[in-house]
Image: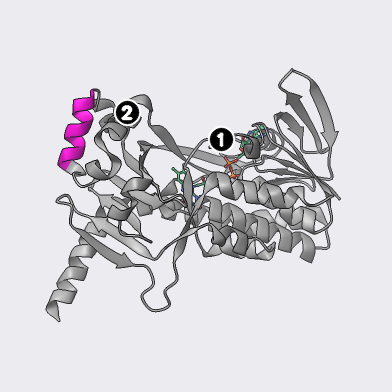
């Protein structure tokens, strides 16, 4: 079977490994440059939390160890109160299960390298999908110099992210329910430099919950930390001058100022705009026997449950299982994928939305309850 994968992000590149290892002829088309040849970290979050469902998918293609070797374990949350006091909430005190912080670029590179090693996989960068015909499996691609080419596949896998062109054309061809919700909150990434790493309690996901907004920090392999400030877009807009930013941090995140550094904080804040957060649901995910969407193209979610990539990786495992079990009768396998995946994908989108309230607010109450409980002994 000839499989065309659109999108060489995390989910598309893992999908290429799955199909490649099964011996299919795979062509992957990615609009951006090969990340292995650039220092730029494409787009969103610099690091991500990898959890059990993502690890299961990586294990299935023999890459779990490679990824975990360079990942930083996070065994719990470390809550920072407004006065700078910290208190841990361990995720799994009984079995010590943890989640892992992984670099997006590094993970993407591991997946691309693994697919590149397979002789039946070809990776094509700087080729943008401009249209797909779900009935014929013809995809139209445009290169930077404006050249337009058609290629045909037996199966087209759209892993082209939240603003998917594959989904756009799928929706033209089939009756699809679709909803897109932007939340009023955005995010901005800051950083704690390596030289301040010793001031952070290691192996935790740090959270500064403040009710209407919050900040989190995840460790990087190079000992720096990526800090993400989530808050209403109106709050971002209200902090116009450097003094506003410093005043806001002095009130709400006082202990984070020396960690991030005053100049670093002000320079990063003033030279970047907050990004929007979108949640996308759609049903179904396939058309006939030739087209399927996976990952954010099928179910983008707000990041508060740390499951967008993990759920996309799980899509790869489920699609692989179904195709194999249906003996590559793609019409049946794709139909089964839509049926099976939709309730779970929508549930995780809802959980992700809910977990913002949990992380920015309820977590405070739980810390309080936890303290009360321990005080009682
Ligand atoms: P993408 O990563 O968007 O990749 C799509 C690829 O398709 C891109 O490379 C793009 O260039 C390419 N493309 C797009 N259009 C075309 C076209 N027309 N032609 C060719 N190529 C095209 N998830 C977690 O599991 N854990 C976390 O901790 C976590 N943290 C997050 C934090 C933030 C702030 C955000 C915003 C998201 C977070 N996520 C997290 C979610 C995660 O980033 C996404 O779920 C994941 O990146 C989805 O991967 P994808 O490959 O489906 O889509």
Where ligand 1 lies, by image quadrant? top right
Circle count: 2
- Marks 1 and 2 close (CB-CB < 8 Å): no
The figure's colour scheme reads one colour
Q: Is mark 2 within 8 Å of ligand 1?
A: no
**What residue would you read off at disc 1?**
39
Q: Secondary structure at mark 1?
A: loop
Query: Magenta stretch containing residue 247, yes or no?
Result: yes
Q: Secondary structure at mark 2?
A: helix
Residue at image coords 65%, 57%: 339
Q: Quadrant of residue 198?
A: bottom left
Gap in Å between the C-alphas at discs 1 and 2?
A: 21 Å
**Is tag 1's residue or tag 2's residue first in the polypeptide sequence?**
1
- Measured along the vertical axis of the image, is residue 159 above or below residue 367? above
**What residue would you read off at disc 2?**
267
Query: Magenta stretch containing residue 353, yes or no?
Result: no
State left or right for residue 197 relative to residue 377.
Answer: right
- Measured along the vertical axis of the image, is residue 49 above or below residue 293? below
Residue segment shown in magenta: 241-251
Instruction: Say which of 171 and 100 sits in front.
Output: 100
Q: Quadrant of the C terminus?
A: bottom left
Magenta: predominant secondary structure element?
Answer: helix
Residue 284: in sight, yes or no? Answer: no
Q: Quadrant of residue 238?
A: top left
């Amino acid at each position: 079977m000839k499989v065309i994968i659109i999108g060489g992000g995390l989910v598309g590149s893992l999908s290429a490994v799955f199909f490649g290892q099964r011996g299919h002829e795979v062509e992957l088309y990615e609009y951006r440059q090969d990340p292995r040849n650039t220092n730029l970290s494409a787009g969103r979050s610099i690091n991500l939390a990898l959890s059990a469902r993502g690890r299961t998918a990586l294990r299935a293609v023999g890459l779990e160890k490679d990824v975990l070797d360079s990942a930083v374990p996070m065994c719990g949350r470390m809550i920072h109160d407004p006065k700078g006091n910290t208190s841990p909430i361990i995720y799994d005190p009984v079995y010590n299960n943890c989640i892992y912080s992984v670099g997006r670029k590094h993970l993407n590179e591991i997946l691309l390298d693994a697919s590149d090693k397979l002789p039946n996989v070809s990776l094509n960068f700087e080729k943008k999908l401009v249209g797909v015909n779900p009935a014929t499996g013809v995809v139209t691609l445009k290169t930077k110099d404006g050249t337009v080419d058609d290629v045909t596949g037996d199966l087209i896998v759209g892993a082209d992210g939240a603003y998917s062109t594959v989904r756009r054309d799928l929706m033209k061809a089939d009756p699809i329910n679709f909803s897109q919700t932007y939340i009023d909150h955005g995010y901005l990434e800051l950083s704690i430099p390596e030289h301040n790493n010793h001031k952070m309690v290691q192996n935790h996901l740090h959270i500064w919950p403040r009710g209407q907004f919050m900040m989190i920090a995840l460790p990087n392999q190079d000992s720096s930390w990526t800090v993400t400030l989530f808050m209403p877009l109106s709050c971002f807009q209200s902090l116009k001058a450097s003094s506003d930013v410093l005043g806001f941090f002095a009130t709400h995140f006082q202990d984070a100022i020396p960690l991030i550094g005053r100049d670093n904080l002000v320079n990063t804040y003033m030279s970047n705009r907050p990004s929007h957060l979108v949640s996308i649901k759609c049903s179904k995910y396939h058309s006939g026997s030739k087209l399927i969407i996976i990952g954010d193209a099928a179910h983008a979610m707000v990041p508060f449950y740390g499951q967008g990539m993990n759920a996309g990786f799980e899509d790869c495992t489920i699609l692989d299982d179904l195709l194999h079990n249906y003996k590559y009768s793609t019409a049946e396998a794709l139909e089964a994928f839509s049926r099976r995946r939709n309730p779970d994908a929508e549930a995780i989108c809802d959980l992700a939305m809910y977990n913002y309230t949990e992380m920015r607010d309820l977590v405070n109450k739980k810390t309080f309850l936890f303290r009360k409980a321990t005080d009682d002994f």
